[in-house]
Amino acid sequence: MKSFLSNSVLKLSVNHQGAELSSLMDFGGIEYLWQGDAAIWPRQSPHLFPIVGRLRDDRYTLNGRSYQLSHHGFARDMDFELISEVETELRFQLVATAESRLKYPFDFALIVSYRLQENCLTVEYDVHNRNDTILPFSLGAHPGFALSWGKENVIEDYFLEFDRDYELQSNILNDDTLLTSETATVLDRSKRVPITQVLFSRNSLNILKHQCRKVSLCSKTVDKRLTVELSEFPQLGLWSKPGADYICIEPWFGHADFANKGGNIMEKEGLVKLEAREIFSCSYSIMID
């Protein structure tokens, strides 16, 4: 099932499964969201909760018990309830179930809101801790943007441009998609990253420390710019299957385990620890110019 929003500039659709954005188009007919391909990457814009990335051995411990939790958590595969629908906003909610408690023994509500205003889509997250103890979690967005704005373009026609010059390093993933201490330079006092066939030959770019406000996806051949405003998020992921015509710009609270760490979830790096009965909120925006 899908729900829809539109205005005079943009129109979008959201799948109730995973509350996942499935289309983001302008009225000129350009589709900005990757449309999925089972042979390459079947998803489009999943929400990552209650972990981002992979745990070592896909497991963690809590109070002496061991729990299995797969890559990026379970929210992306669960049905959300549409709890509010108005002209400019859709709000979806996921609450803890008997199934989720087997993997993650906490009561929570995750609310994902889509708000459309002129050329800007804002995606907001609210995590409600319904426990009398701390709720440990990570949270991330994983939107995949199409590199097919023109009729006869190639991925080398596109590039990423940050809001200013930065020095940014990425921690390399090992074969088990766990973080290592090995790093690679993403930006060296510069702001532009060319998109090439080999940019993601060693999997995703995992920027664990940044002060970036905005990252723009730009085309050399089409007079359009897609900008992700992500200043609230302390980590940033960039990813695509090598040579595929999409790129994911991923704001994160949290990241994968390091290969030499893991275990007690309360000691996991990058974790949000939400106090009892409190609410955690954050948002990012996508602007089309």
Image (cartoon, rainbow, N blue to C red):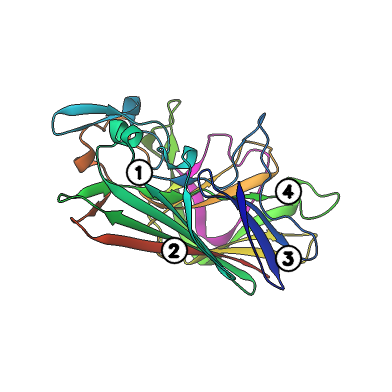
Q: Can you tell which quarter of the image residue 65 is in?
A: top left
For badge 3, the amino acid type reads Lys
* Residue 115 visible to the viewer: no
Q: What whole-number distance in Å separates the C-alpha atoms at marks 3 and 2?
A: 23 Å
Element marked by disc 4: helix
For badge 2, the amino acid type reads Ser
Q: What whole-number distance in Å separates the C-alpha atoms at marks 2 and 1?
A: 16 Å
Q: Residues within 10 Å of mark 3 (few under 14, many from 20)?
A: some
- Would you place residue 245 above or below residue 82 in this image? above
Residue placed under numbered mark 3 in the picture: 224
Element marked by disc 2: strand
Q: Can you tell which quarter of the image residue 89 is in?
A: bottom right
Residue placed under numbered mark 4 in the picture: 156
Residue at image location 62% in from the left, 35% down from the top: 42
Pointer 4 or 3: first along the chain: 4
User: Residue 98: percent from the left, percent from the top?
Assistant: 31, 34
Q: Residues within 10 Å of mark 1 (few under 14, many from 20)?
A: many
- Would you place residue 106 above or below residue 23 in this image? above
Q: Residues within 10 Å of mark 4 (few under 14, many from 20)?
A: some
Residue at image location 69% in from the left, 66% down from the top: 10
The region drawn magenta spans 183-205
Q: State if disc 1 and disc 2 touch (CB < 8 Å).
A: no
Is residue 201 highlighted in magenta? Answer: yes
Q: State if disc 3 and disc 1 touch (CB < 8 Å).
A: no
User: Residue 235: percent from the left, percent from the top?
Assistant: 40, 53
Pointer 1 or 4: first along the chain: 1
- In front of the other: label 1 or label 4? 1
For badge 4, the amino acid type reads Glu
For badge 1, the amino acid type reads Pro
Which disc number belongs to residue 50? 1
Q: Residues within 10 Å of mark 2 (few under 14, many from 20)?
A: some
